[in-house]
Amino acid sequence: MATDKQLRAQLADAIDSRSAHVPFDRAVRGMPPALRGVIPIGFEHSTWQIVEHLRIAQHDILDFCRNPKYEALAWPDDYWPAPRPASAAAWTRTLAAYRRDRKALQRLAANPRIDLFATIPHGSGQTYLRELLLAADHAAYHIAQIVDVRRVLGVWT
């Protein structure tokens, strides 16, 4: 059905946030290492914290969708890291993991064997569609925060 294919394509696009928002890859490109852990005055989180939070939350949503033995993380402790990355390698690993899980969510959205409107068997009424929309919405919100932090730090171009 063409409508199903269109819905799946739009979901995959929304997860990547290419159409309506600054995409993740653009938001993090060229972020100076010395500023990744800086929390600007008036803000609650550093760029690192937001990026790592995005990775953690996105992975959690993906795990919930795929893992029948899923165990929820503790809010907020498991979702928010310390202000600074442990190393440049931690930043690189986080970006790679975020991109990997984003691709996995896009594959899930595109998979015609997944009924987007079906409830997730081990959930409490959540559908795959709801989780995919949640991932896209959550990413858009926090990617905008990354841009805002970078603007205040004077490193948004």
Image (cartoon, rainbow, N blue to C red):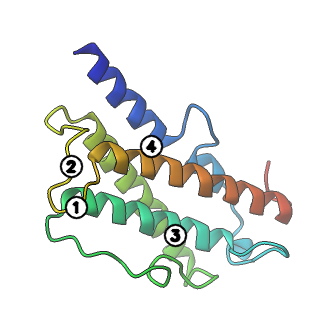
Q: Badge 3 is on which residue?
A: 53
Q: Report crowding for label 2: few under 14, some 14 to 19, many 20 or more residues within 10 A (C-alpha).
A: some
Q: Could you tell me which secondary element the residue under label 4 belongs to?
A: helix
Marks 4 and 1: which is nearer the front?
Answer: 1
Q: Badge 2 is on which residue?
A: 119
Amino acid type, residue under disc 1 in the picture = Gly
Q: CA distance from mark 4 to mark 2?
A: 20 Å
Marks 4 and 2: which is nearer the front?
Answer: 2
Q: CA distance from mark 4 to mark 1?
A: 21 Å
Which residue of the protein is positioned furthest toward the front in this rendering? Answer: 125
Amino acid type, residue under disc 2 in the picture = Thr
Q: Quadrant of the N terminus?
A: top left
At horizontal 52% and vertical 70% (from top left) the residue drawn is: 52
Q: Badge 4 is on which residue?
A: 15
In this rendered view, identify the residue nearer to me: 150 or 130.
130
Q: Badge 1 is on which residue?
A: 123
Amino acid type, residue under disc 4 in the picture = Ile
